[in-house]
Amino acid sequence: MIFGPTPLDQAEGAILAHSLKLRQVVFKKGRILSAEDVAALAEAGHTGVIAARVEPGDLHEDAAATAVAEVLMGGGLAATAAFTGRCNLIARQRGLLVVDDERLDRLNQVDEAITVATLRPYDAIEPRQMAATVKIIPFAVPEAAVARCREIAGEAEPLVQIAPFATRRVGLIQTSLPGTKPRLLDKTRRAVDARLAALDCQPAEEVRCAHDEAEVAAAIEALMARGCEIVLVSGASAIVDRRDVVPAGMVRAGAAIEHFGMPVDPGNLILLARRGDTALVGLPGCARSPKLNGFDWVLQRLVAGLPVARRDVMRMGAGGLLKEIAGRPLPRAQAVEGTGPEAPRAPHIAALVLAAGRSTRMGPVNKLLADVEGRPMVARVADAARTSQAAPVIVVTGHERERVEATLTGLDVTLVHNPDYAAGLSTSLHRGLAALPEATEGMVVCLGDMPRVTATVIDRLIAAFDPLEGRAICLPTWRGKRGNPVLFARRYFAEMQTISGDVGAKALIGEYPEEVCEVAMADDAVLSDVDTPAGLAALKSAG
């Protein structure tokens, strides 16, 4: 890659290294300069720019990030479209994040330009949460370095994946001694059931018995006969040795003791055993508490179907100090209740499809109902939004409402009718805004007469969206020309409600040039809307 001062006569196709403001337009860093851009720079008095030029044997940052991400990614994950050299892996289901940290370390040492960061291995993860990010540091990297990263990632099973939580049948044995209070057993039962509910499991099947080896063995037999896959044993007295009452009862029931103790505090006195496919766990006393402890880490892995062998337990020491001490920034209660710092996740972006217009330039024909490659035009637009990463998809109807809505039957979209559609586009925008969920962080506005726009276009806009980095309005371009759809951050919703007449939200773009991010697209679909019979004929002949 060539990097540095670049004369304008060599700047076409180069990648702008630093943002430049030209009157009412901002050229953001990373922009691939077109001939029109170079002319605009010259007109503004520039003779050169700081830029990067890709050489033979190099990969553009987005292509490199995509290539690395697709081979890293295992089950339960989806990759976002790459933008500015970043490609994120997003969770599609609940579970535990499994990372081969040895291979990850080797991959990150291939080239300083290629980096992969993940959440901590075995972190619990929720849908839409970010699990990992691939970031290419410069604007381009050697193809050979990317190839080596792909080799490392492809050596074995996926380097990053999610082990989903499964609905396991769990048994709970509680032993008692003379003087053991029933309310203590009830407290333990509530704490265990709360943990199971958080992992999508039913309440435990409980057996209470005396703190006696033979009775523990009989209780284990009874729960296994009911089909319990995991059996938890909470003793009236803490386990202090492999030969204590609880482990002795497990052995008497035919189980093998696999490990005693763990380098996690609280949670040290945990015991692991197995009989066939059934996992048995001797609980530490802290399992009676709802606060985070070592038992949580073991239970999560068992419910996710992951092995918990001696080596796994003894590697939990780093980060295993869970006590609430003055120097610990996040108390265990906050970790359990979710009141700590928010985990990174994909933004909540909705899609708004405007499909209320009267198609006045089409004559008697409603263009939204016109056949495009075997489907009504508006159905193609709505389906592209539905298959993108945007959710929910809201379709605003108006003119010939019943006919338009009939074409959307079976699609997972929300229909909103605008009875004031004749008053202009702004009224449909207002109706769509009112239907957005409260958690919506951005909205991509799609036009019902642009059937060539695909889910990939929408996903690239979502990948570019980052209001904290000055990318609060993301719009697509083709060879320097701006098109549709456009993604707006929530901060503009209130102002959109003040727009009137037959205009849409694009009126805001000129007001906030510093917040605009132009996203280059692969073809001119983002410029191609259908307004006239001739335009419809051209679209059909091109298809």
Image (spheres, helix red, strand yellow):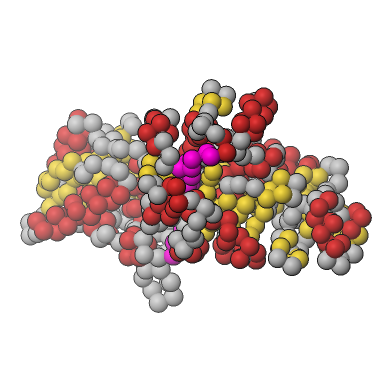
- The residue closer to the viewer here, 377 or 164, is 377
Q: Give the camera-side residue of 18 and 150.
A: 18
Give percent across and percent down for residue 147.
74, 39
Q: Residue furthest left?
A: 178
Which residue is situated farthest in the front direction here? Answer: 363
Q: Residue at x 85, y 63 (%)?
A: 43
Magenta stretch: give its range.
341-360
Q: Is residue 123 visible?
A: no
Determine whether, in the image, residue 524 is placed left or right of residue 188.
right
What secondary structure characterizes most of the magenta part?
A: loop
Q: Is residue 532 above or below residue 375?
A: below
Left or right, 468 with reference to 290: right
Residue at the extreme bottom of the image, as rendered:
326
Viewer-closest of 306 and 29 = 29
Residue 354 colored in magenta in the image: yes
Considering depth in this image, is 41 or 111 the residue closer to the camera?
41
Number of dots carrying numbers: 0
Which quadrant does the C terminus fall into? top right
Q: Using the rendered image of the protein, determine whether residue 206 is visible from the camera's viewpoint.
A: yes
| Residue occupying the point 83% across, 66% down | 44
Q: Is residue 433 magenta?
A: no
The percent coordinates of residue 242 (x first, y second) are: 31, 49
x, y (%) of residue 360? Answer: 53, 39
Q: Tell whether 242 sits left or right of 431.
A: left
Q: How far across and how far down the image is residue 118, in percent?
A: 55, 52
Please tell me which residue is depicted at 78% across the width and 58% down the height of the picture.
Answer: 16
Q: Is residue 308 left or right of residue 538?
A: left
Residue at 14 percent across and 54 percent down: it is 185
